[in-house]
Image (cartoon, helix red, strand yellow):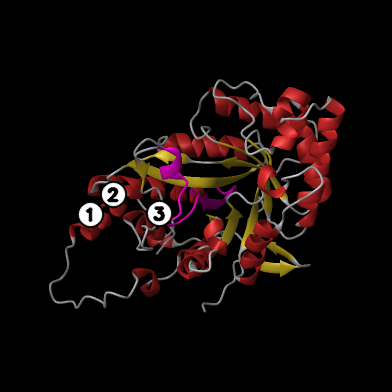
Amino acid sequence: MRARRAVERRGGALELPTLRAGAGPARPDPGPHGRVRGLSAVILGLGVLLGGCGDGGSTDPPVDVNPLDTVTALRDLADAQGLGLGSAAGAALNVSAAETYRRVLSEQFNVATPENAMKFGPIHPEPDRYAFDAADAVVSFAESHGMAVRGHTLVWHQQLPSWLTGGSWTAAEADSILRDHIATVAGRYGGRLVAWDVVNEAVLGDGTLRPGFWADHLGRDYIETAFRAAHAADPAAQLFYNDYGISWLNEKSDSVHAMLSALLSAGVPVHGIGFQAHYEVGRLPSRSTLRSNFQRFADLGLLVHVTELDVRIQLPASNSELVQQAADYAMVVEVCLEVSACRMVVTWGFTDAYSWVPGTFTGWGSALLLDAGYEPKPAYWAVHQALGG
């Protein structure tokens, strides 16, 4: 097994050394062939890959050799950049037949995020009962493979249990439930997670507060309550606000920026902003827009994480769409590397064998770096190149 340096143990905690703004060693200067590659070079290389062009004199490797086993792993390239490179880890982690899933996850990524296991409903299914087994499994797997863990998510308007949403609660009772839940869940993993998505998707597209159980019972104050409770439960964790649709300069991202600025001014322990980055192929913000948006949140003193990156394609995917998808992935990674406060990129899964996309977006799929057979797609090679490979 390759030597790993991305994750250091300090007092039992798992931390990537350069995740906190201003801390850790600076990213190395990789020179002219380093971390930021032009999309034209990426696309040119991928055209060769998809076109099947060779030198005519080489011998193809045996069919049972996966190309992943012949190149430097993504996590090793990310380590050299001081970057957290993660994937959501889903139910397949606990399927006995999914040995390839576990092996590739641990070899290619230095961060794991529980895809569903830490959400309110799965982890707190009854008023007085918590179900930690699935979340514990992700944390234990990550720790045993030198990976950091990014918690997701403490407070969200979805995946709430019926005992909560179907009850008649006063504001004081709802506040107590929220605080107790955060204290219990974040406290259980205190010192073991590098970061938490504390509040998820609290803002609508027009910039107003999203209605839902917490907002309906507690108003906007639930956001501050959640961050303060999370910090009390795990003072070492970086605490993030996480949302989709904020990659662009728009009403929603403006509202989130103003909200976080106000929270920071009030002394609320918010450490970062999570850009979910669920995209359709070829429909991303421009490079300059994404960079400017990352930077304006960084200028507040916040860390920036890309938290749920995937790029879906309407099926069947064409070669040109796979090339465009590769360029899209490369651009996001490159922009993150260009903004010093951007310390992590997490993809929402890594193989099309286990992806939320087909079940959510009818007719769409092929959104991740590896196909359903764990073969690297052009997007994998584009990210590999963007990281300096």
Around disc 3, counting alpha carbons within 10 Å, would you say few (fewer than 14), some (14 to 19), or many (20 or more)?
many
Q: Where is residue 100 in the image (x, y as percent from the top left)?
A: 45, 69
Res. 52 image quadrant: bottom left
Which element type, helix, strand or loop, lies under badge 1? Answer: helix
Question: Is 262 part of what is drawn in magenta?
Answer: no
Which residue is pictured at 40% across the width and 37% down the height?
284
Please give the residue where the numbered disc 1 appears in the rendered image. Answer: 47
Which element type, helix, strand or loop, lies under badge 2? Answer: helix
Q: Where is residue 12 in the image (x, y as percent from the top left)?
A: 76, 67
Please give the residue where the numbered disc 3 appears in the rendered image. Answer: 352
Name the disc covering residue 323, or none: 2
Report if the CB atoms under discs 1 and 2 are less than 8 Å apart.
yes
| Three-letter code for the amino acid on which mark 1 is drawn | Gly
Name the disc covering residue 210, or none: none
Give how far apart the Cα atoms at labels 1 and 2 are: 7 Å
Q: Would you say 45 lies left or right of 83 here?
A: left
Which residue is pictured at 64% across the width and 71% down the height?
144
Q: Mark 1 or mark 2: which comes first in sequence?
A: 1
Residues drawn in magenta = 338-361
Q: Position of residue 374 (x, y in %)?
A: 38, 63
Judge by depth and name the residue closer to the eye, 177 or 84.
177
Q: Where is residue 330 in the image (x, y as percent from the top left)?
A: 39, 50
| Three-letter code for the amino acid on which mark 3 is drawn | Asp
Judge by depth and name the residue closer to the eye, 341 or 45.
45
Judge by depth and name the residue closer to the eye, 258 or 188.
188
Give how far apart the Cα atoms at labels 3 and 2 are: 16 Å
Which element type, helix, strand or loop, lies under badge 3? Answer: loop
| Three-letter code for the amino acid on which mark 2 is drawn | Val
Q: Would you say 80 lies left or right of 374 here?
A: right
